Structure formats: C-alpha cells, structure tokens
Image: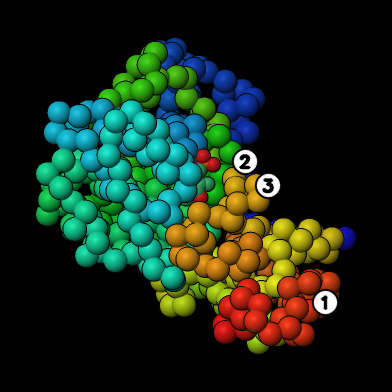
Amino acid sequence: MKHIYLDYNATSPVRPEVLETMLPFYREQFGNPSSVHWAGRQVSGALEKAREQVASLINASPAEIVFVSCGSEGDNMAIKGTLDALKDRGNHIITTAVEHPAVLETCAAMEKAGYEVTYLPVDKNGELDLAELEKAITAKTVLISVMWANNETGNIYPIEEIGRIAKKYNIRFHTDAVQAVGKVPVDVQKANIDLLVISGHKIGAPKGVGAIYIRRGTRMTQFMHGGHQERNRRAGTQNVAGIAGLGKACELASQELVSYYRRVRALRDRLEDGISSQVPEIKLNGTPFRDRRLPNTLNVSFAYIEGESLLLNLDMFGIAASSGSACTSGSLEPSHVMGAMCVEVTLAHSSTRFSLGPETTAEEIDHVLDVLPTTVQRLRDMSPLYNCGRTAEGCETCETVRRL
Ligand SMILES: *Cc1c(COP(=O)(O)O)cnc(C)c1O
C-alpha cells in the first residue's frame, strides 16, 4: 500500500540534499569544532556556514544565531534565560493560551517558581485581540512570548504588530517560529523580535537540532554550563552534522519559499475545498481567512465521530494525519488549542489535522478525497451520536452539531 504522509507539522522527512550535506560529518570530517588543528578547522567552517544560512533565512546576523538541540530547548532557554536575567526589573510574562507545550509548560514551571503569567485568550477562530495584549502589560512585564504560527490550526499571528507593542513598552519579545520558518516570510528586523526559535525536523532537517536567534546585546542567563561553545551562550560540543543539515534546509527554504507557498497552498486549498463540498457537517478549526493560515495546514472537525478512530481508519488506507498535536494524542483530553477556542467538546474530540509538505502531490490529495468521505460516513453510521441526532429530539450535543 502507498503511504501518504500528511503530518508535516509533527515532523518532516530529511531532504536528500540535507542528508548529502550531513554525511561527510559522520565519515571523514569527524573533528571537534573547538579543536585548533586541521580536524577541528574542517568542521568549524561548516558550523559558521550553517550559521550564515540560518541567519539569512530570517534576516539576522550569523553572530546572533545559537545552535541548540531542538525547538523545545530554544523555547526553554528564551523564557528561563530572559526571566532570570531581568528578575530585577520584573516578574511578569505575557503569552497566549494556544502556545506549544514547550512554551506553556515552561511558563507553568515559572509560575511555580514565583513568576506571574498572563495567558491571552483567543476567539472562536483562534485569533488574538491585541487590545487585550496591551491591557495585560504592567510595569513588571519583562517578556512577551507569542508563537508566529500555531501548529494545530495553522493560524498566523500578527507578529509585526506585537513587535511594535513590545518595542513601545520596552518589553522583550520572544516568538516560537518553529511552524512559520520555511513556510512564510520571517524577518526578525521587520517584526522587532529579540528571541526566535527554529527546529530542524519541522523543515526537512533531522531531529535533535534547532537554533535560537538572540538579538545582539540581549542579556540572558545561560542555563547549559560547561565549555565555551556558542559564544558562551550554550555549552556542549555541537551536533555538527545536524547543524550542517539545518543550514542546508534553511538555504533550500530561502530559495524555495515562494514556490513552496504557491504549490502547497494550492494543494491544501484543493483538500479544504474537496472536504467542504464532499463531507457534510464539518467545522473548520482556525481562521476562515486562508491568507492568515499557514499554507500547508488544515484542521477540521467531523461531527459525530472521534478524531482518533478516523485517524486509525485513514491509517488503514496508508494516510497519516493527526488529531490535536502529536504530543497530546494518546491522552483523552481534547487539545488545549481547541479548548481555548471554545470548540464544543465532542467537536474538539473529532478535530483532525492535515499538514502538507513539499513532497505532497495532487494525486495524494485526490486519493485522500476518494477515501475520506466514505470513511467518515461509515464511522458516522456506527456512531450512536449520529443516529441519536436523527431519531431523538432534545439531545444537546446533537443540537449543537446540527446548528453548524
Ligand atoms: C514541534 C514544535 C516545537 C518543538 O520542537 P522540537 O524540536 O520537537 O522540540 C515547538 N513549537 C512548535 C510550534 C512546534 O510545532
């Protein structure tokens, strides 16, 4: 059976050009980049090349890029490092209710340590109200942390406006750009960003490597201690092969951004239009304005059925999608993002995310559109909720989904 992978927001395959770039560092170029001899020099050049490639994608300087082990580490470092460095100035951080757990759980840990956190709400489409952001600012606010794009809905947040607000109040601004980088233009200067986080495995580089942009002159407490790597920002011998791969993936992303957007967006729209026209009683999760969503992401709830059982049934046809985020699936709690959007609980349970990538083809999308409507109908026919909705009056859940 053919495998169709529509879960790029969870992770992406390593691109062949990226793997080619990495292989020498697992073979002859094995040196430690901190060594002064030929073996070290061979690989320290590769680190600096990758730093330029990453910096160039986001309009930063290479000296502002620090390599880390993953997106989660970058988010931890940005938040903990900032709060500690600025603890004399204040103890308040503003974030949103829809962040990735790498931010949300870090904020929760900071709350336990005595910091104050404001979690900005979103509306039913997952959009932020920037007036709420300004209202939440106090004299003690030292950090605003808002993701560039949401991993579950694909919603893109108004980062430039938030950057203007942060600048106006002289507050440090961190953005988790793991889902945005490589999919939409990202410019740290235009958006006045102080800290921005990238993860390799979401953009065709391997797992276990990431980068954080730290604006020149930004004070941060170091939390990985040891050697003097990464200008004393992050100790530990660098993952040279992974970093070289991340650099190559960023270079490819720069070159392909426009064509990627156009191609993937057309395929996503084809999927979105196909589902809308062929499957009744669905709800789109996220902003209905497609321009304000990542070009590759579609999140839909199919009334009356469980997202998990839909996923298992799609899996039988070789189709890989996701319900909620990869990290929360396996638990019965609906995703915090659906919760923050006040999606009715049975609909939140049926939320299904399709996320496309540069390797996705029109044939794959058409195959999904062949399989999905009948699969949904088969599951609905087995669903007590669905049948209840058609036979009995006064069932609240059925009434809610019927009103869609
Ligand atoms: C995947 C993801 C992360 C975590 O990145 P890892 O490299 O897997 O630690 C953080 N934020 C967002 C928005 C993500 O999608």
Residue 98 is drawn in which quadrant? bottom left
- Where does the N terminus fall, quadrant-wise? bottom right
Task: Examine the rendered structure and indicate whether residue 189 appears above or below residue 371.
Answer: above
List the residue tagged with mark 3. 330
Left or right: residue 140 versus residue 246 is: left
Q: Specify the quadrant of the image occupied by residue 194.
A: top left
Q: Dot 2 corresponds to which residue?
A: 20
Relative side of 123 to 362, left or right: left
Q: Would you place residue 344 above or below residue 94 in this image?
A: below
Label 2 crowd (10 A; few <14 / some 14-19 / many >=20):
few
Residue shown at 40% from the left, 38% from the top: 108
Which of pointers 1 and 2 indicates the residue nearer the eye?
1
- Amino acid type assigned to the residue bearing label 2 in the image: Glu
Q: Residues within 10 Å of mark 1 (few under 14, many from 20)?
A: some
Ligand 1 within 8 Å of the CB at mark 2: no
| Residue that label 1 marks | 381
Mark on residue 329? none
Q: Going 31% across and 23% down the picture, which residue do you hit?
A: 222
Q: Which residue is at a point 45% across and 60% down the rendered structure image?
A: 340
Marks 1 and 3: CB-CB under 8 Å? no
N-terminal of the pair, mark 1 or mark 2, is 2
- Image location (x, y in percent) of residue 335: 55, 55
Q: Quadrant of the C terminus?
A: bottom right
The front one of 92 and 31 is: 92
Q: Does any portion of residue 359 appear in the rendered image?
A: no
Q: CA distance from mark 1 to mark 3?
A: 25 Å
